[in-house]
Image: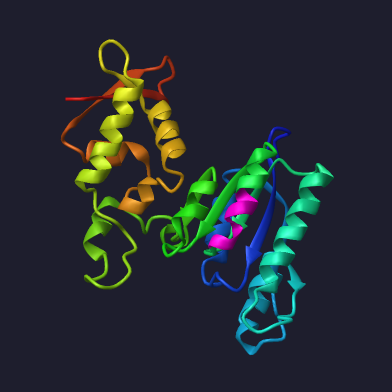
Amino acid sequence: MESKTDPRLAVLIDADNIPYANVKEMLGEIAKYGTPTFKRIYGDWTKPTASGWKTVLLEHAITPVQQYAYTTGKNATDSAMIIDAMDILYSGRVDGFCIVSSDSDFTRLATRLREAGMKVIGIGEKKTPKPFISACEKFIYLEILKPSGESKGSDKKTKDKKGNEKTVDEVDDKLIRMIRSSINDLADENGWVFLGELGSLLLKKHPNFDPRNYGFSKMLPLIKSIDKIEVDERDSGNKNIKLVYVRIK
């Protein structure tokens, strides 16, 4: 049953820059953040290359929006998405947007929507330019949206060979420094930080931060894999819930 507090989301998909293979997993991911009240996908459906989308759109009740390429070299799809996004914004019928694209042309749109108080989630491939990622409140890579159970810490061994695009990144010194710096920003007088607060700060600093990028399904296993960080799981009064705190050793 849908909660009354569930944010209403407008999901706008750029078919020119997104493959259809992960649509099911993508919509499942979006459902974690709210209820899609608009589900629209933009592209030139007269092109033979768009034929693969038909079954996917029917299965997931996504509304296709036809947009002809009026001029060679110009992306009319982007303009149509931006116009619709602003119309939806001013309708007052949503609490946030999910922009599905790997195109930096949507950077200004994401910025404008956030200025209007909207939650903005971006979804795209790892090739997505950094300005668009930074403009979103949260950015999720399509490559990590696998069926449940496929993404585990041990998956780091399955990354592609050097020179090819990787699905899972390594837990390197840069990531550890980023986490340590954020712990220092939040630490109490004894150096402890509540794990939920740490995750929120990391996401504010780096919208594309996600434990799944490093092969971990959750934040806690990622933190436990770092020797330089101490973990304390405390009782909450509920036997099913632990309060997790971390600090630098």
Whole-percent x and y of residue 112? 66, 46
Whole-percent x and y of residue 87? 80, 53
Q: Residue at x 61, y 56 (%)?
A: 99
Whole-percent x and y of residue 61? 72, 64
Q: What coloring was used for the rendering?
A: rainbow
Using residue 142 as the reference point, say whether residue 164 is left or right of it: left
Give the answer, above or below, for where 131 lies relative to 174.
Answer: below
Q: Which residues lie in the magenta part?
A: 104-110
Point out the image quarter for the N terminus.
top right
Q: Is residue 62 visible?
A: no
Q: Please name the predominant secondary structure of the magenta segment in the image.
A: helix
Residue 205 lies in magenta, yes or no? no
The one nearer the camera, 245 or 43, is: 43
Q: Residue at x 73, y 54 (%)?
A: 85
Residue 244 sits in quarter:
top left
Whole-percent x and y of residue 137? 54, 42
Give the answer, above or below, for where 139 lies relative to 147.
Answer: above
Residue 27 sits in quarter:
bottom right
Point out the image quarter for the C terminus.
top left
Q: Residue at x 67, y 87 (%)?
A: 47
Q: Residue at x 37, y 59 (%)?
A: 150
